[in-house]
Image: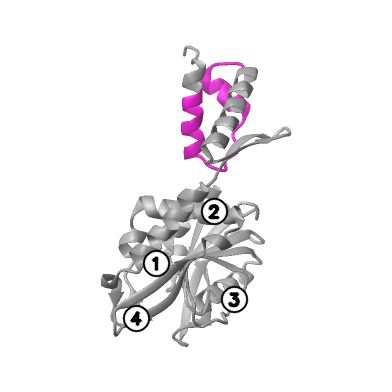
Amino acid sequence: MGKFKRNERIAGLMYIFTNRPNEILTYNYFSKLFNVKKPSISGDIGIMKELVKKLDIGVIETIPGANGGVRFIPGNNKEETKKFLDYLCSELSKKERLIPGGFIYMMDLLNNPQIVKKIGMILADEFIDRDIDYVVTIETKGIPIGLMTAEFLGVPLVIIRKNMRITEGTAVNINYISGSTKTIQTMSLSKRALKEGANVLIVDDFMRAGGTIKGIKEMMGEFNAQVKGIGVLITTLEPEEKLIKGYKALLKLEKVDEVDGEISMSSNFELLRQFK
């Protein structure tokens, strides 16, 4: 294989970094890939650091030591993030989304790869410094958000089931009380899904009183896992006192008026750590 020109290597580095976020890649790997010596790769990385800084799309971090290398930590542009969350508020506040019972239809947004990818990137940014080993969510609507968050953190996704599945082997089952319906429900997780003592980030699409997430925290206790953060797309204004503390929500549902068909949604952009 012939040597690559610098502009070709820069293009290749950008492609690799954006497709393998938060993964530590060695200089030796790049040296063999582009058929150049390590000092050339070091120079390329220096250019890349300045490039991602100018574009405001994240940070390229050098990891020292024998097992070190370099990794790309994706970031979010402040203005773009604000516009995106405002867009979600506008979309989710449309009257036609109101479903009998006071529910809001949002599956079209949660099934849109570009939208869910952006949500995942924002949530990942909020918890990037928590040394996360797994992202944990519960089926089913939380899965797309959880998967994208896990991708940007560079960690696996663990899905808690609402019903035990024999195909997943021996499982841990717990009962929990839904904070919104006050009914007893069951969640199940395979014993093979999570390593003992792992650091986890809990992610979900919607939280009213916090009963489900409280149940997930109790499930994590069965694995001696440390809950390092809780991120949700939407939380409700009422009840004001939730069953959990220390969560981060991107949006807040302030009011649903079934009579007038009105939905009031607001952004929590100003509360996001990364933009303070």
Q: Nearer the viewer, residue 246 or 165?
A: 246
Which range of residues does the magenta coloring cover?
Answer: 10-37
Give the farthest residue toward the top.
2
For label 3, the residue is 244
* In this rendering, the label closer to the viewer, 4 or 3: 4
Q: Secondary structure at mark 2?
A: helix
Q: Amino acid at mark 2?
A: Ala
User: How far is disc 3 from disc 1 in space, using C-alphas?
Assistant: 21 Å
Name the amino acid type tagged 3: Ile
User: In this orientation, does residue 38 appear?
Assistant: yes
Residue 140: mark in rendering: 1
Q: Which residue is mark 4?
A: 102
Residue 201, x across and y down, in percent: 58, 61
The CA span between labels 1 and 2 is 20 Å
Mark with earlier residue (2, 4): 4
User: Considering the numbered disc 4 on the image, is that residue within a helix, a strand or a loop?
Assistant: loop
Look at the picture and state if 43 lies above or below 58.
above
